[in-house]
Amino acid sequence: MRKTRMEKSEMSTVEFCQFALRERIAPPSVGSVKERIVYAARKMGWTHTRTRDVWYADPRVSIKADQLVKVEAISGLEYARQEVRKNDDAIARATALLGSQDAHLLGEIVAALLQMVGLQNRTRA
């Protein structure tokens, strides 16, 4: 997947980290999958188990914001900054709306919350 296509696609945080580990941090040129996981663990400063879980996108894995930023920095990909900006914008919008006396306050809050979780507001024309 190309960088621009990958950055524009809708993928989960774990999928992004999996892609970054496999393609950028420990590419196939490093060696076998086992060697690549060990290499990625060293580069990320993670345990072997955590790296393996992210490598195989275990659904139980959670990626914290600081870990996501580290993956982004090491891999050279942009995902975390875009997600953080998007969430910060949505939170700022919701906060501003909570202080207003707008007649459409509820609709605007719902739209902001939907944007924050990545859903499109389909009620607007």
Image: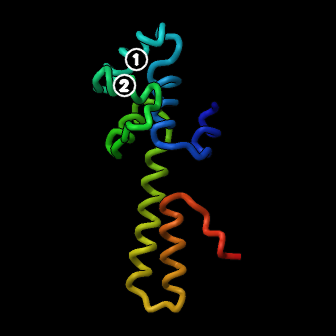
| Residue ID at (50%, 23%) | 22
Instruction: State which quadrant residue 50 falls in.
Output: top left
Crowding at dot 1, Cα within 10 Å, few <14 / some 14-19 / many 20+, comes out as many
Q: Which mark is residue 64?
A: none
Left-right relation of 6 to 36? right
Residue 41 percent location from the top left of the image: 34, 21
| Residue ID at (49%, 85%) | 105
Q: Is residue 97 above or below residue 53?
A: below
> In the image shown, does 105 or 100 lie closer to the viewer?
105
* Amino acid under disc 1: Ile
Q: Which mark is residue 37?
A: 1
The N terminus lies in quadrant: top right
The residue beneath circle 2 is: 51
| Residue ID at (39%, 75%) | 95
* Amino acid under disc 2: Thr
Mark 2: which secondary structure? Answer: helix
Q: Is residue 30 above or below residue 98?
A: above
Residue 120 percent location from the top left of the image: 61, 63
Mark 1: which secondary structure? Answer: helix
Q: Is residue 84 above or below residue 17?
A: below
- Tell me which label, 1 or 2, sits earlier in the chain: 1
Distance of label 1 from label 2 (alpha carbons)? 6 Å
| Residue ID at (71%, 76%) | 125
